[in-house]
Image (cartoon, rainbow, N blue to C red):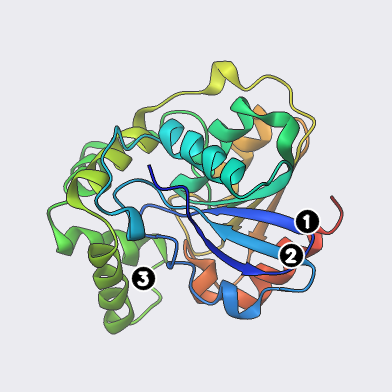
Amino acid sequence: MSSSMRRIGEGDHAVLCLHGWFGSGEGWGFLPEVADLQNFTYYFPEMRGYGARGRETGTFSMEEYAADTLAAADAAGLHNFSVVGHSMGGKAAAALLIESPERVRALVGISPVAPAPVPLDEDSHGLFFGAAEDHGKRKAILDFTTGNQHSSAWLDSMVKRSVENSTVPAFAGAVQSWVNDDYSDRLGTPDTSILVMAGEHDPALSADVMRQSWLQMYKNVEVVEMPACGHYAMYETPVALVTRIESFLAEH
C-alpha cells in the first residue's frame, strides 16, 4: 500500500481531505488555490483505485479508505489532525472517527454521506450502480446533484476527470460501500466538533437530509446550507466554502 499523499501548505494545523466518489487527490476543484496555506497544511489521501493509487486493489470500502488514511497519517508523522470529507469521503471520515476519535481535532463534511445506509428507489439504484460502466449515467448524476444548474461542457469535464482518475472496480466497489455500509451502531459519543455543509441545489444530500442524519447521530454538530451551489462546492463556490471551513477549523 502506498502511504504517500499530496500535501500543500506549511501551517501547524494538519487537515486530511477525503475525496468523494467522483474525486481524487487532485479532484478538489479550486480549494487548494484559495486555502490558507500559512496556518493550515492540507493532505489529500486517496482511496485505492483512485488517482496515484489506481493500480492498488482492495475491498474499496469506506472502512478501508479510513484505515489507509490513518496509515498515511502515521507515515507523515501526524498524530492530531482535522478531517474534511466530501460526499462518500464523509462516510469514510465517520469510519476514521470511530477508529481514532482521540486524534481528530474537528470534522467537516461537505455534502457528506452519513454513516448509515443510503435509501435509494429503484430508478436511483439503477442510476448509481450502473455509473461505473456508463459515462452517461455519471453525467446524469452530476447534473442532478448540482440542481441542473451547470453547462453540459462542465459536466463533461467532470465526467472525464472522474473516468481518468478512478478504475471501474474501485468506482463500483465504492458505491457498494457508501450506499450499503452501516456504522450507526458503532459511533459512540465522541466529543469531536462536526460541521456539516450542504449545497442548496443538491436535492440528494440536502440540509434537511443532514439534519435527519448527522444531527441525530452526533452531539456536537452544526449544519449549514451553502447558497448558490450543489454537491460540488469546491468547484461551484470555492471561496465561500473554504472561508467557512477554515473559520470553523481555526476554533479547534
- Report the residue at 28% width, 45% height from top: 56
Q: Kindly identify the amino acid type of the residue bearing the numbered disc 3.
A: Asn
Q: Earlier in the sequence, mark 2 or mark 3?
A: 2
Q: Position of residue 135 (x, y in %)?
A: 16, 63
Q: Is residue 106 visible?
A: no
Confirm or deny contact between disc 1 and disc 2 (CB under 8 A): yes
Q: Position of residue 181 (x, y in %)?
A: 40, 27
Q: Residue furthest left?
A: 133
Q: Kindly identify the amino acid type of the residue bearing the numbered disc 1.
A: Leu
Q: Kindly identify the amino acid type of the residue bearing the numbered disc 2.
A: Phe
Q: Earlier in the sequence, mark 3 or mark 1?
A: 3
Q: Which residue is mark 1?
A: 249
- Report the residue at 24% width, 60% height from top: 138
**Distance CA(mark 2)–CA(mark 3):** 34 Å
Q: Residues within 10 Å of mark 1 (few under 14, many from 20)?
A: many
Q: Which residue is mark 3?
A: 148
Q: Position of residue 146 (x, y in %)?
A: 42, 66
Q: Which residue is mark 2?
A: 40
In-image side of 125 versus 67 (left or right): left
Check disc 1 and report its element: helix, strand or loop: helix
* In the rendered image, the vertical position of residue 4 relative to residue 117, given as above or below: below
